[in-house]
Image (spheres, helix red, strand yellow):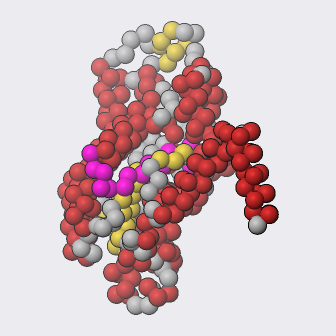
């Protein structure tokens, strides 16, 4: 009893001397306890969860599919490249828990590989119809698909700045058209695709799941401007704000957005504007796909709205831009090896 009294006195003394620290600690503990209380698996066990991963043929989407398959969820993977999608399906099948991988029929029931382009309404409607037929619905929608763009905007139009002067001095019609074509490709892959998925699957999730959830894989470029990334940043920002707005319109669905910095892989190799990678090698300096995938799943399980990766790096970039924009712009220029001429 004496030791308990002494401990309580110590806590009270600390609260008086360090009120801000104690308040922050209390908020941290409360948040952790609340997240445990809200854990989605209490309502929807992993073995019953029906997961749709759009953009699963490579990168983060592929890693997410692996994680869900290994945990015993029902997994549907969607991507444009059918051959690669079949490889991912086999990888997922090899990760199934033994109890779920006994027979070939079990594997077919728990793993679906559906080729399709998420920018095309007919493809996503076909996915929805297949899920309704096979599983009777879906619980979790994860959107990982997207495209890169790597060139300064005026360079896409065919202009180069030399000594502070554009060469040639004026853009011609073909340059404008080329820029519009690249912008349309970026918007198709980074905005229209997520839009089509939202319109197709939000009603389906609402009608068929007792704990519907949607996660959008966004990018730090959606909230922090960067040189050579004008088409990419603007199109990614559009889809992020779209889903943030949809979260308000559909509060019965748990929306999450992960905002990672550079991630390993060859995502930049197929830039819609034909640009070259300027920053340090993503495969040496980028986030590991498996780490990002596990963080995505953790966010969904705990109903977490938004997360930066790395947390400190993303928050410094995001808030730092509003506090000291010139510094963040200089750092962005260094990251992408860009100097205004």
Q: Compared with residue 119, is residue 157 higher up or lower down, i.e. above or below?
A: above
In the image: residue 254, left or right of residue 222: left
Q: Quadrant of the C terminus?
A: top right
Classify residue 276 as left or right of residue 247: right
Q: Foreground residue, 155 or 52?
A: 52
Q: Position of residue 201 (x, y in %)?
A: 26, 57
Residue plotted at (47% across, 60% down): 302
Residue 171 left/right relative to 19: left
Q: Is residue 252 magenta?
A: yes
Q: Quadrant of the N terminus?
A: bottom right
Residue 218 appears at what percent x and percent y?
45, 45
Q: From where the camera sits, is residue 276 visible?
A: yes
Which residues, given as a range, are shown in magenta? 249-263
* Front residue (pair 167, 130): 130
From the viewer's perspective, is residue 10 above or below residue 130? Answer: above
Residue 202 versus residue 328 in the image, above or below: below
Residue 45 lies in the magenta stretch: no
For this orientation, the residue located farthest to the bottom is 103
Report the front residue among 155 and 8: 8
Question: Which residue is depicted at the point 31% across and 44% down?
Answer: 248
Q: Residue at x 38, y 52 (%)?
A: 255
Q: Position of residue 283 (x, y in %)?
A: 63, 51
Residue 57 visible in the picture: no
- Please state the total of marks drawn on the protein image: 0
Q: Residue 306 location in percent, x, y? A: 47, 47
Look at 24% across and 73% down and name the residue there.
Answer: 136
């Amino acid at each position: 009893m004496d030791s308990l009294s002494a401990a309580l006195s110590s806590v009270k003394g600390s609260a008086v001397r360090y009120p801000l620290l104690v308040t922050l600690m209390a908020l941290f503990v409360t948040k952790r306890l609340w997240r445990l209380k809200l854990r989605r698996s209490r309502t929807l066990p992993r073995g019953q969860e029906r997961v749709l991963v759009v953009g699963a043929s490579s990168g983060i989407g592929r890693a997410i599919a692996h994680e869900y398959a290994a945990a015993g969820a029902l997994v549907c993977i969607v991507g444009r490249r059918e051959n690669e999608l079949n490889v991912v399906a086999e990888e997922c099948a090899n990760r199934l828990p033994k109890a779920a991988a006994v027979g070939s029929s079990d594997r077919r029931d728990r793993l679906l590989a559906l080729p399709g382009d998420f920018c095309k309404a007919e493809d996503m409607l076909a996915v929805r119809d297949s899920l309704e037929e096979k599983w009777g619905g879906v619980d979790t929608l994860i959107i990982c698909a997207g495209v890169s763009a790597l060139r300064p905007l005026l360079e896409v139009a065919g202009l180069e700045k030399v000594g502070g002067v554009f060469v040639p001095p004026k853009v011609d019609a073909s340059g404008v058209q080329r820029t519009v074509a690249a912008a349309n490709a970026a918007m198709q892959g980074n905005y229209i695709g997520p839009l089509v998925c939202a319109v197709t699957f939000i009603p389906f999730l609402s009608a068929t799941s007792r704990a519907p959830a949607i996660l959008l894989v966004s990018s730090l470029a959606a909230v922090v401007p960067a040189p050579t990334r004008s088409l990419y940043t603007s199109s990614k920002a559009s889809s992020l704000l779209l889903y943030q707005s949809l979260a308000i319109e559909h509060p019965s669905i748990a929306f999450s957005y992960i905002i990672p910095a550079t991630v390993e892989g060859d995502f930049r190799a197929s830039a819609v504007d034909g640009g070259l990678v300027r920053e340090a090698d993503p495969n040496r300096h980028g986030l590991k796909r498996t780490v990002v995938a596990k963080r995505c799943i953790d966010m969904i399980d705990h109903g977490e709205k938004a997360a930066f990766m790395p947390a400190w790096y993303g928050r410094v970039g995001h808030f730092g831009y509003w506090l000291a924009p010139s510094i963040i712009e200089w750092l962005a220029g260094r990251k992408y090896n860009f100097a205004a001429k």
